Image (cartoon, helix red, strand yellow):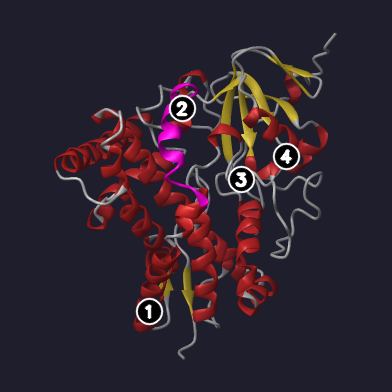
Amino acid sequence: MTTDRSAPASEHASLSTARPAGCPFDPPGGLAELRARQPLSPMTYPDGHEGRLVTSHALVRAVLADERFSSRYDLMHYPFPGGPAGTLPPAPVGDMTGMDAPEHTRFRRLLAGRFTVRRMRLLTERVERITAEHLDAMERQGPGADLVEAFARPVPALMICELLGVPYADHETFQGFVTDLMSMDATLERQTAAMQGLQEYMHRLVLAKRAAPTDDLLSDLTSSDLTDEELTGLGGFLLGAGLDTTANMLAHGTFALLSHPDQLAALRADPGLADQAVEELMRYLSIAHTTVRVALEDVEFDGHVVRAGESVTLSIEAANRDPERFADPDTLDLTRKATGHVGFGHGIHQCLGQQLARVEMRVALPALVTRFPSLRLAVPAEDVPLRTGMNIYGVHSLPVTWDEA
């Protein structure tokens, strides 16, 4: 017989976003202690829902791979303070993150062949050109720049726009929509308005692609069985995912390297470390820090019973710092083989664009630190503004400078 070893209500966990003072790369305080004591913990959600919090690497992977846990938003409760009470609205049409099979399977099959390792590596030369152009512009301007605006944001934005066939000239418009959608403390009304704005923008673009297809992914998908509404939603989903995540990895990854001079020197001395560096930075930083699933039936995990209907919050950042999986996990070590990290997720919802993100990071980071050997922060590290209130962690800006050549 299974025994439910849940802790009493007084020991229920809550999800904190407050990071230790002076430690911008570490997970919020308390997660490590919780992982060591009770990696599958009862959790009281801000709206009063009694669910679970998972903090170990093994259990996070297990939940992500288990089809008995749903990814549908309309079944789950929001884990962060300030969010909506009760279950969330259903996922917008085309938002693959909020779908279960078979709907998710249909969309994934349409796209999987277009995001293969081989296809994404064919884009390497284009990433190299875009990277070089932005480094040239920084060099011409002279020392002093916000790396987010000058480099980290435009490089992946140009790539996803070219891949999808979205005019980059409109980037300020759709970047604003995406920022509101990624905010953990934005009101439901503000997020709804942002989603509506993005959908209206993409709908006009989809109609234009159907009328006059060009050589891009959206045009290619007009020949599929997707409706205008589905293609509009899917286009907005892919655009948002491609804009925000890699941009924050480039900026926050640079911040981490500048804060760890030995690792920066290692990458600069051996650009061949780029592949391992990308995986280690994904593990160490875990910018997509949290996700949620919902039990569709009673499920036993680690001697506990997760009841049907319970929301289960998965701490990706705690899982990626689990000493049971990674030796000395709180140390950034670019020589580490960080295989098995869950920075790109796991299971059927593992990041579709992970190979594109890898190409962008393995090109852009070594190129940046090689071009500017004296690159350094232009402000004290404690003054770098952190995205603590966003679904994707990182920095709002990264003031840097360097010496004239």
Provide the residue designation for mark 2.
Answer: 104
Query: Magenta stretch: residue 360 in it?
Result: no
Residue type of the residue flagged with mark 2: His
Q: Residue furthest bottom?
A: 405
Compared with 84, 284 (above or below) is: below
Provide the residue designation for mark 4.
Answer: 57
In the shown orientation, is residue 343 left or right of residue 3? left
Q: CA distance from mark 2 to mark 1?
A: 42 Å
Q: Does the image show residue 21?
A: no
- Is the residue under label 3 in contact with that under label 1 (CB below 8 Å)? no
The tag on residue 136 is: 1
For the point 56% across and 65% down, the residue is 255
In the shown orientation, is residue 76 left or right of residue 231? right
- Is the residue under label 3 in contact with that under label 4 (CB below 8 Å)? no
Boundaries of the magenta span:
98-117
For the point 63% across and 12% down, the residue is 297
Front of the two marks 4 and 2: 2
Residue 180 quadrant: top left
Residue type of the residue flagged with mark 4: His
Nearer to the camera, 353 or 111 = 111
